[in-house]
Amino acid sequence: MRKNIVAGNWKMNTTLQEGVALAKEVNEALKNQQPKCDVVICVPFTHLASVNQVIDPEKLGLGAENCADHVKGAYTGEVSAPMVASTGATYVILGHSERRQYYGETSETLKTKVNLALENNLTPIFCIGEVLEERENGTYSQVVKAQIEEALFNLTAEEFSKIVLAYEPVWAIGTGKTATAEQAQDMHAFIRQTIADRYGKEIADNTSILYGGSCKPSNAAELFAKPDVDGGLIGGAALEAASFMGIVTAF
Ligand SMILES: O=C(CO)COP(=O)(O)O
């Protein structure tokens, strides 16, 4: 179901102690609030079980930042979807551009990861987005469309309706260069139309599409005011409770 969501992606930041403290701070800040969005934190694997102990699941969702493309076995260093689910997490970020870029993730592996996440009742927050060159040479819509088609369009309508999408233009991640609210709206509308063409208008209208890339308290309200922007996937600004809450309350 379409919901407004603000999700933090902590990436490879915080020690376990720092992470638990940050989660507690966010949880505490949410206690006396009725935010107009669901709030989620996606944290390193090492933090999941401990963070789960200190948050109120009614107020704050928990997710991982990745999962393996196998269920179990001889895959040294990998963490599977069932393992993530066993910590109490209910979300998993998949296909983040940093994973595609630095760890060679392809649509083929992502397809498997999405299926495993769904089989284990994890909600995938599936990331898509173009690099600067693709923005500048005008191919960005086709790039994003292909990313969605290749990894997700094998899903049944019922399965697809469990996916959350995050449009993250790579040129806006960690650069301080946010997409304008108009650029975000244009792409979100295009993404929704792409979904409608495959699964129909009802499912498209019920899909949450988040924006990610240098989203901060100062620009969140303008982005979230756009009709097809259903929230944000937040990197840097999620690492301090005050700035993260500044984005949560932008709704
Ligand atoms: O990659 C992001 C979230 O997944 C965005 O990161 P920043 O908010 O730091 O630009």
Image (cartoon, rainbow, N blue to C red):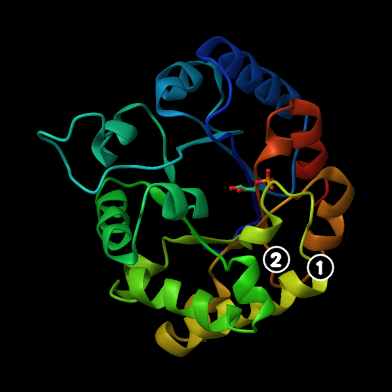
Looking at the image, can residue 94 be seen?
no
Q: Residue at x 41, y 61 (%)?
A: 162
Label placed on residue 127? none
Q: Quadrant of residue 109?
A: bottom left
Left or right? Give the position of 82 relative to 198: left
Left or right? Give the position of 15 relative to 115: right
Q: Quadrant of residue 74?
A: top left
Q: Quadrant of residue 10?
A: top right
Give the amino acid at mark 1: Ala
Where does residue 80 sit, x and y in percent of width and height?
25, 38
What residue is disc 2 on? 229
Give the amino acid at mark 2: Val
User: Residue reaching furthest left?
Assistant: 73
Mark 2 vs 1, N-terminal side: 1
Give the label, 2 or 1, closer to the camera. 1
The one nearer the camera, 176 or 72, is: 176
Q: Residues within 10 Å of mark 2 (few under 14, many from 20)?
A: many
* SS class, disc 1: helix
Where does residue 128 sit, x and y in percent of width and height?
52, 64
Left or right? Give the position of 122 relative to 14: left
Q: Residue at x 89, y 47 (%)?
A: 218
Q: Residue at x 34, y 65 (%)?
A: 107
Residue 158 drawn above or below residue 232: below
Label placed on residue 181? 1
State the CA–CA distance, disc 2 to disc 1: 9 Å
Tally of numbered discs: 2
Where does residue 140 sit, x and y in percent of width and height?
59, 78
